[in-house]
Amino acid sequence: MLIFYKYMFYFFILSGLWSFVSKRKHLLSTLLSLEFIVLGLFFYIFFVLLFYFELYFLMYFLTFGVCEGALGLSILVAMIRSHGNDYFNSFNMLQC
């Protein structure tokens, strides 16, 4: 049964990576795929560290995951305020 969970976490991580690579039109879809990868890594690390009774590392991992999400949302809000949408095609580096 534990082997099923191990492959399930790999599926989470790989599907998040596939979504991150394939859907690059919108910033919101890339941020959601990054959060999906972080969620898969969190569950994998949880089940690995559960055997060692060392769950304090998960608090650090969750802290960095929340900071990554907040930074991504702040970039999304700044991009929508300055350009009006979250398309990468309308974002010109020369205008900044």
Image (cartoon, rainbow, N blue to C red):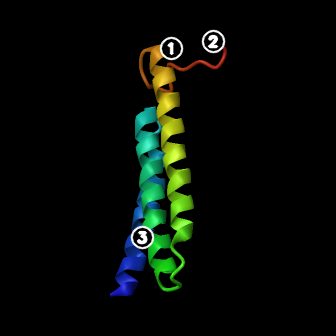
Task: Locate residue 39 relative to residue 56 in the image: left or right.
Answer: left
Q: How far apart are marks 2 and 3 (CA)?
A: 41 Å
- Looking at the rendered image, the quarter that the N terminus falls into is bottom left
Q: Residue 5 carries which label?
A: none
Task: Please give the residue where the numbered disc 3 appears in the rendered image.
Answer: 9
Q: Which of marks 3 and 1 is nearer the N terminus?
A: 3
Residue in view at x 56 percent, y 68 percent: 57
Report how many numbered discs are placed on residues in the image. 3
Residue at (46% x, 80% y) in the render: 50
Alpha-carbon span between mark 1 and mark 2:
10 Å
Question: Could you say whether the residue bearing mark 2 is in a helix, strand or loop?
Answer: loop
Residue assigned mark 2: 95
For badge 3, the amino acid type reads Phe
Q: Residue at x 67, y 15 (%)?
A: 94
Image location (x, y in percent) of residue 60: 57, 60
* Helix, strand or loop for disc 1: helix
Q: Which amino acid does label 2 sit on?
A: Gln
Question: Where 67 sits versus 61, above or below?
Answer: above
Disc 1 marks which amino acid?
Ser
Report the quarter where the C terminus lies.
Answer: top right
Of mark 1 and mark 2, the one earlier in the sequence is: 1
The residue beneath circle 1 is: 82
Under tag 3, what secondary structure? helix
Asked whether the beta carbons under mark 3 and mark 1 sit within 8 Å of each other, the answer is no
Residue mark closest to the camera, 1 vs 2: 1
Q: State the image quarter where residue 56 is shown.
A: bottom right
